[in-house]
Image (cartoon, helix red, strand yellow):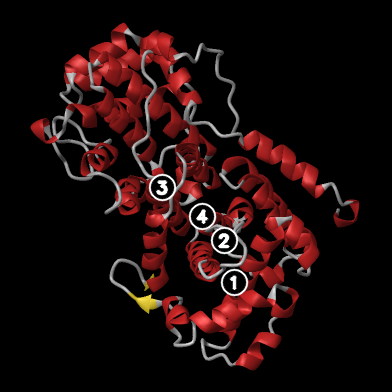
Amino acid sequence: MDEILPASDNSKSQWDFIPEQQLSAGQILCIISRMLVQCNEVYGLRSIKLAYLASEIAAHVNWDKRITLSNTVLLALLKSVGDYHFDSEKVIPREDLTAYQIKERYSYAYAYLKNLTPLGNDAHALLFYDSIYNQEVAKKMVSMEYASIVFTAEHILYLLEQTNFAYTDMDFDKFGLSKFNPRYVEIFKTIDANREVSRNLRLIEGSDRKIILPCERELEKLFLSLKFSKPDSDMLFKLMIMILDFKSTVTVWHTIHTAGYAVSLGKYAGCSENELNEIFTAGVLHDLGKMAIPQNILEYPGKLRNWEYGVMKSHVQKTEELIKDLVPRRIANMAIHHHEKLNGTGYPRNLSGLELTKEDQIVEISDILSALVDRRSYKEEFDSQRIIEIFKEMTRKGELDENLSLYIYDCFDRLQERRDFYSRLLVLPLGTVEVEFQEEMYLDPGMN
């Protein structure tokens, strides 16, 4: 994942503009949760159920001011990132995993959440996955308290499923809940006295997808109400990109580079600062729907067959589903119009001419430029001369705006340099995650 970018002076005086992403932390968390479902529906829905239940329990903790809803929901939602990392398109029941594999998943999740989310050291909660609650340790380490909330919620979910939501008080002694802080079990019993919480966890039939969880809507309401600092919101924005790595590292870098090209091209095209911020945000959003595309199609090392290409093209619709009702319309349009062409030959809506704004076309051209410059599963990098010839041909056909394409011809090298600078703003240390994961796995030689 890690790519070496050339050293640059990061001062605003040199670059005269630093783009700002335009989404709140709540909007980003909604998109991330939807991406997890697109990646693996079974794991994704389980993550949503766990985040909902853990947050309901945490909302009623009034004796420990260290516990926050934002940290609880992040831990619960992303607890299973090890499962997505090792089995993005498969489903392996926890009971079928060896002790080593379970440790492997939690160790990866710990390193991931520690380095890529605002949780920092509170991610240590995941390493208490097999520990008995210790009140004295919990007084010193809030991560043990978080662990008790999250793993209590996980065991309650298992209890609900095994009893078909018709549980009794005696059932709580049968499902391993005695190892956690008993206060959290009592909270659940209280808040679910009328079965409203457990009802929200049950699947119902729906028209948009075969199954819908009422708690999805409740969880998104919670996301949108949470307050994060700007640095934490920006970190979650970058995390949204990194989540793509569960399916395709190439798509991560394509996303980062497209956003970088879009800001660079927008500057040359005279866009306002607000327009540049919107373009930057849309560049990051434009391919998130590729989370729903099977990996064997997404990274196929050759020409796709017609039906496979049809599946690949559906990523635009999947992106629209991810950002629906969350992202401002102008930004959403820029993201979902990136395969439209001025002459109406693009997809999915065959838009043309005045139906496409200048900003739409900037994101489109940036997407094309990134695809041509970068190495892909089916091609090597193209040199500048070949890329320019391709743009000239597309312009001749009326697919691209002639004035915008001129910047590709005249400023190609400067666009690469600016892309590299802006790309730095979107990178999180996935390499550090891998190093710390390996260190954590080998701390206990008996597990290997």
In 3D space, how far apart are the residues under numbered discs 4 and 2 (Cα atoms)?
A: 10 Å
Q: Is residue 315 above or below residue 91?
A: above
Earlier in the chain: of badge 3 and badge 4, it is 3
Q: Which residue is mark 2?
A: 76
Q: In x, y percent, where is residue 67?
A: 59, 59
SS of the residue under disc 1: helix
Q: In this view of the protein, can residue 386 be seen by the observer? A: yes
Q: Residue at x 78, y 47 (%)?
A: 440
The residue that disc 4 covers is 70
Examine the rendered structure and indicate whether residue 76 appears above or below residue 334.
below
Distance from Cα at disc 4 to Cα at disc 1: 16 Å
Secondary structure beneath label 3 = helix
Q: Which of pointers 4 and 1 lies earlier in the amino acid sequence?
A: 4
Q: What amino acid type should be assigned to the residue bearing mark 1?
A: Ala
CA separation in Å, label 2 and label 3: 16 Å
Do tag 1 and tag 2 residues touch (Cβ < 8 Å)?
yes
Q: Residue under label 1, please give it.
A: 153
Answer with mark 4 or mark 2, whichever residue precedes in sequence.
4
Q: Earlier in the sequence, mark 2 or mark 3?
A: 3
